[in-house]
Amino acid sequence: MREQVQRSDPAEVGGIWFLDGDRLESVARSDLGSATVLVPSEQVLILAVDLPLPSRRQRLSALPFAIEDLIADPIGEVHVALGMELAPRRHLAAVVRHEVIAPWVEKVMAAGLVHARIVPDALSLPVPEEGSWSVQLSGGRVLVRTAEATGFATSVAQLPVLWAAAGNPICISYGEKLPADITSVPGAIELEPLTTRLLVPALDLRQGAYAKPRRALPFTARKVMAIIAAGAAAHAAIAMLDTLALQQIADNRRAEAQELVQQYLPGISVDDDFAAEVNELLTGGAGPPRSSFLPLLIRASAALGGGAPGVSLRSLSYNAGAGELSLQVEQADMNALQRTEAALANAGLSPVIGTPYVQNGVAAAKIVVREVAPGVAR
């Protein structure tokens, strides 16, 4: 039995809610996690989009351009939201008109669910195996979740047309019996509870202009976080270098680490300032970097780890005067070296690759990495 909420409640309640028009109804109560408000998927376009960019900030910036040709509305009239990564460089995304989501957020806020997530209800179904759909029919309305993790809602009258257009996937039915002409099998007798399935939603529409307000941390929590951050900063300074093949650093004391780092990075000191700067960069802290070394190192490391599979880093050096990071890399072949160069460029860097050569059956080259100058197109 759904409980209808008709007044503002300053004490935020958890669990799952459903918003339909002016009605905000409780579907399942839970004290675990933030509240989640399900909204009708008929008013949301859910897509899978290729976004071959290394950072979430870059993906968010590129998302409107990636979906512009897939929608009928002008891009300025819609809100776009980025969801979970479905496969390498492929992400879930959603599009909803501003005139639709703005009232949703107002109603959720007015009901006291200030920090609630807003999720299209089709994403409450489990993702099925390849070649099938998860389908839930209830009162003539149908929710569908596809094997690519996208989803939609439709009427039972329209379902056969959409099903045929999709190539007649097997429908795993979790609701009322589907029309006889649709190939279907019963779903699990008992699905995971809705609160469990939506504990970490695949997509939250509350982003950008509709983002949730920040929660203020209690003093005790802030103190604990500060202690954790201080410890993490010192570890991060070592771990970042460890990702660049200086394996011994993780097991040495600071003095031993400094001696080893000097073999590769003359002039770089693994001290408290170094650790503090790593922490600022990782947490988005204010203030300009003390040098270009750490930003270059972190971005190059992320690019090599995420966009250049199979790369082997043989050595690196840093030229403080020129602000250059020199990487001696090896790959399986020349094409792989080009992909490594492209991965660095996609990370917002300006790589210059030297003359490649083949040694011991592998392709090798020196790549000099710099920051892209402001206003310079790559």
Image (cartoon, rainbow, N blue to C red):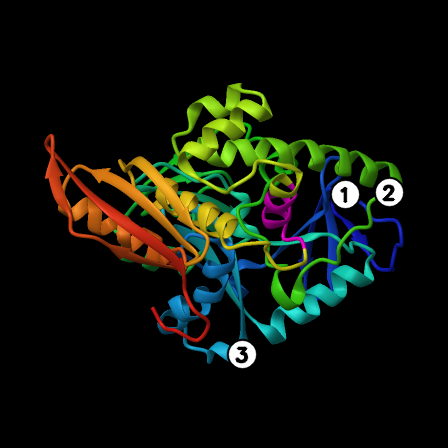
Q: Give the distance between the C-alpha atoms of the residues marked 2 and 1, in whole angstroms.
A: 19 Å
Q: Quadrant of the C terminus?
A: bottom left
Q: Quadrant of the N terminus?
A: top right
Residue name at image x 43 percent, y 44 percent: 302
Residue 207 visible, this angle: yes
Judge the density around disc 1: few (<14), some (14-19), many (≥20) Cα neighbours within 10 Å.
Answer: many
Q: Nearer the viewer, mark 2 or mark 1?
A: 2
Q: Is residue 59 left or right of residue 346?
A: right
* Residue hosting label 2: 218
Residue name at image x 75 percent, y 58 percent: 213
- Whichever of callouts 2 and 3 sits on the residue coming sooner in the sequence is 3
Three-letter amino acid code of the residue under disc 2:
Pro
Residue 183 magenta: no
Disc 2 to disc 3: CB gap under 8 Å: no
Position in image of residue 134 (x %, y %): 43, 42
Q: Which mark is residue 77?
A: 3
Three-letter amino acid code of the residue under disc 1:
Gly
Q: Which mark is residue 14?
A: 1
Q: Give the distance between the C-alpha atoms of the residues marked 2 and 3, in whole angstroms.
A: 38 Å
Judge the density around disc 2: few (<14), some (14-19), many (≥20) Cα neighbours within 10 Å.
Answer: few
Q: Give the residues in magenta.
A: 276-285
- Whichever of callouts 3 and 1 sits on the residue coming sooner in the sequence is 1
In the foreground, 182 or 281: 281
